[in-house]
Amino acid sequence: MRHGLIVKMAQTRRNDSSQLAYFQGSLLMTPSPLERWHALVAQRDATALPALLADDVIFYSPVLQAPQVGQPLTVRYLTAAMTVLGNASFRYVRQIVGPQEAMLEFVVELDGVAVNGVDLLRWNEAGLIVEFKVMLRPLRAIHIVSRRMLATLERIAERER
């Protein structure tokens, strides 16, 4: 959890002389959507996804033409992606952050192929992700991820039945 720092100035009196005393305190703040996303990925905790996603979130897959609309579909795809990409080599290597959006570049190795990708996140004022877009390179990586995602999504669908 992120802690902000407040510096409070309080005037104290000692032996009729005034002094300024500075006190440091913690201000508990709600973690940003980006902080919550990083924690979720680090813990590989897909069960935390619904609390982070808006009901009408839109997920853009690197291999599907049509966007996937809604929290249930997005949870399914992100859960599969966490399974497929979530090995020990996965790491974010760069991020660019705005007030309500972020670009997260990641690298991971799959089947001996160096996968390079980008997650583009946008969130609303309530701190819920409303758009999640994934881009991958090189083409060989897209084929590997696509094949693994299909198999993982089939297993998820089977469990949901």
Image: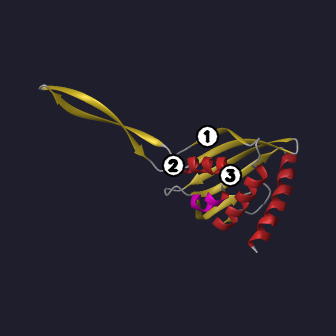
| Nearest the eye: 146 or 3 | 3
Q: Secondary structure at mark 1?
A: strand
Of the numbered discs 3 and 2, the one sitting upstream in the chain is: 2
Of the numbered discs 1 and 3, the one sitting upstream in the chain is: 3
Q: Amino acid at mark 1?
A: Ile
Q: Secondary structure at mark 3?
A: loop
> How far apart in space, not on screen, are marks 3 and 2 (Cα)?
18 Å
Residue shown at 58%/48% (left/top)?
A: 34
In the displayed structure, 6 sits above or below 32; it is above
Q: Residues within 10 Å of mark 1 (few under 14, many from 20)?
A: few
Q: Secondary structure at mark 2?
A: loop
Q: Residues within 10 Å of mark 3 (few under 14, many from 20)?
A: some
Q: Identify the disc placed on residue 31.
A: 2
Q: Amino acid at mark 3?
A: Arg
| Residue named by callout 1 | 96
> How far apart in space, not on screen, are marks 1 and 3 (Cα)?
22 Å
Magenta stretch containing residue 154, yes or no? no
Q: Which label sits in the foreground, 1 or 3? A: 3
Q: Position of residue 159 (x, y in %)?
A: 77, 69
Residue shown at 72%/51% (left/top)?
A: 134
Q: Which label sits in the foreground, 2 or 1? A: 2
Q: Amino acid at mark 2?
A: Pro
Residue 94 falls left or right of residue 66: left
